[in-house]
Image (cartoon, rainbow, N blue to C red):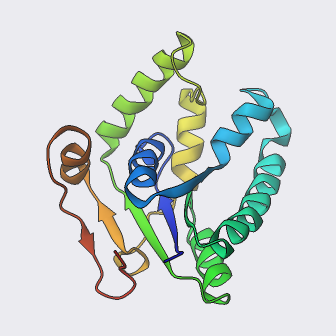
């Protein structure tokens, strides 16, 4: 059955890695704002970054409708950092009768800082096609992120679940009973 899964979480929390695993498991199309932005502009969108990001998101919302109409499952990987962005996405799909799930990746500040450090090193060494996030950007992103409330999320993944997913067999997911569709 066609449905959309929206991955919520801070930059560099594991959304893309999780999205790739989920894509294979769900046999879904993965639509990523960062992937498209980096392919088009690299690290250098500058002051137009927010405008370009909004345009890419609008394009991917429309592209997701095409894929869903074709019967595919779709995963959106772009963070949904604010309650407003999550509400918009929910309304966008619900008014079209499209089933959706929000998955949230919840990691500690310490773990997030470690992940940023590792990713930045990989970007500098040419081993990762991702954004380099300096201290100023990490502070900006932290201030913009609004952690979701439990009632907004269908699948809440904390550090134990992520360790299980990426390093051990089995994953325990906390799902709300309504809206959870296998």
Whole-percent x, y for residue 96 in the image: 67, 87
Whole-percent x, y for residue 130 in the image: 58, 30
Whole-percent x, y for residue 166 in the image: 26, 41
Location of residue 89 with respect to 162 vertically, above or below: below
Among the 4 quarters of the image, the one containing residue 43 = top right
Q: Residue at x 48, y 77 (%)?
A: 1
Taking the view exactly as shown, the residue that stands out farthest to the front is 70
Would you say residue 77 is visible in this rendering?
no
Taking the view exactly as shown, the residue that stands out farthest to the left is 169
Name the foreground residue: 16 vs 169.
169
Would you say residue 54 is visible in this rendering?
yes
* Image quadrant occupied by the C terminus: bottom left
Q: Residue at x 63, y 69 (%)?
A: 85
Numbered disc total: 0
Taking the view exactly as shown, the residue that stands out farthest to the top is 125
Q: Residue at x 57, y 65 (%)?
A: 82
Q: Residue at x 46, y 25 (%)?
A: 119
Among the 4 quarters of the image, the one containing residue 137 = top right
Q: Is residue 36 found left or right of 157 in the rendered image? A: right
Whole-percent x, y for residue 95 in the image: 66, 90
Location of residue 25 with respect to 177 vertically, above or below: above
Q: Is residue 4 found left or right of 34 in the rendered image? A: left
């Amino acid at each position: 059955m066609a449905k959309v899964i929206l991955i919520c979480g801070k930059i560099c929390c594991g959304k893309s890695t999780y999205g790739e695993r989920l894509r294979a498991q769900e046999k879904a199309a993965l639509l990523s704002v960062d992937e498209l932005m980096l392919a088009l502009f690299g690290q250098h969108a500058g002051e137009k970054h927010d405008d370009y990001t909004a345009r890419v998101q609008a394009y991917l919302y429309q592209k997701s409708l095409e894929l869903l109409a074709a019967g595919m499952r779709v995963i959106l990987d772009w963070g949904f950092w604010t309650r407003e962005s999550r509400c918009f996405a929910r309304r966008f799909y619900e008014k079209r009768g499209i089933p959706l799930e929000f998955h949230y990746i919840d990691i500690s500040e310490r773990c997030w800082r470690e992940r940023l450090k590792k990713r930045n090193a990989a970007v500098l060494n040419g081993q990762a096609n991702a954004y380099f996030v300096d201290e100023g950007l990490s502070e900006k992103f932290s201030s913009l992120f609004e952690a979701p409330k439990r009632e907004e999320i269908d699948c809440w993944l904390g550090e134990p679940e992520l360790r299980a997913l990426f390093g051990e067999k089995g994953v325990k997911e906390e799902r709300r009973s309504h809206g959870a569709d296998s």
